[in-house]
Image (cartoon, rainbow, N blue to C red):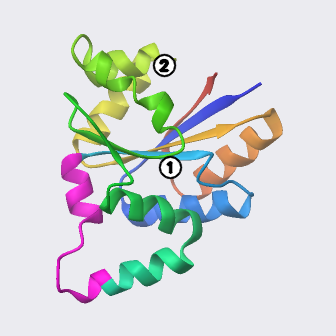
């Protein structure tokens, strides 16, 4: 049975730490997605032209594994903008999250997340956090043992609002 585990991170460094832990568990880009607001993407992931950060980002992507791949996607065309919600998605769950745009017209992010199975109180917390610049991480797992290990890794990385959704 497939499940999706979601968590929120206030800082990029926490999300990077979580992604490293997930990679150690054997998860790949095919299992993980990031969701950020356009403002958070600019703050956390924009590379200024002509700065040394651009060189560092390229080096980081080559050695950063899962974190490097997902973060580089957020800085390039590897991410998908969700119209009407001011959100950017990167990673394998893009297809599943693409429906977020359809929910924007009726219920915004909260309504869309509730439609995906997120409890309403959690969806409201996610929306508030994302609007303040947090990073939402979603991990697809295929069994209960993997789900338990993923949740432990997210807790160790100081994730907030960890939620397990049945697929």
Residue that appears at 58% across and 53% down: 29
Q: Main secondary structure of the magenta part?
A: helix
Q: Is residue 51 above or below residue 46?
A: below
Q: Which residues are magenta?
A: 38-54
Q: Which residue is mark 1?
A: 159
Mark linked to residue 110: none
Judged left or right of residue 20, residue 68 is left
- Residue beneath the point at 50% across and 45% down: 33
Label 2: which secondary element: loop
In the picture, measured across the screen, residue 4 lies left or right of residue 43, that is right
- The alpha-carbon separation of the residues under discs 2 and 1 comes to 20 Å
Number of labels in the image equals: 2
Crowd class of label 2 (few under 14; some 14 to 19; many from 20; radius 10 Å):
some
Tag of residue 116: 2
**Viewer-nearest of discs 2 and 1:** 2
**Circle 1 sits in a helix, a strand or a loop, which is it?**
loop
Where is residue 99? Give x, y as percent.
39, 23
Horizontal and vertical percent for residue 125? 35, 30
């Amino acid at each position: 049975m497939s499940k999706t585990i979601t968590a929120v991170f206030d800082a990029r460094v926490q999300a990077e730490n979580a992604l490293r832990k997930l990679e150690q568990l054997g998860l790949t880009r095919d299992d993980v997605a990031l969701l950020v607001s356009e403002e958070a993407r600019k703050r956390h992931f924009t590379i200024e032209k002509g700065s040394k950060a651009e060189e560092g980002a390229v080096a980081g992507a080559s050695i950063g594994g899962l974190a490097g791949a997902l973060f580089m996607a957020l800085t390039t065309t590897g991410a998908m903008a969700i119209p009407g919600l001011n959100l950017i998605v990167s990673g394998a769950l893009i297809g599943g999250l693409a429906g977020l745009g359809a929910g924007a017209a009726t219920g915004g992010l909260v309504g869309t997340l509730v439609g995906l199975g997120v409890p309403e109180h959690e969806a409201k917390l996610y929306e508030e956090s994302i609007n303040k610049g947090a990073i939402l991480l979603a991990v697809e797992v295929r069994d209960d043992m993997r789900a338990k290990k993923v949740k432990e890794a997210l807790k160790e990385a100081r994730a907030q609002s960890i939620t397990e959704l049945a697929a």
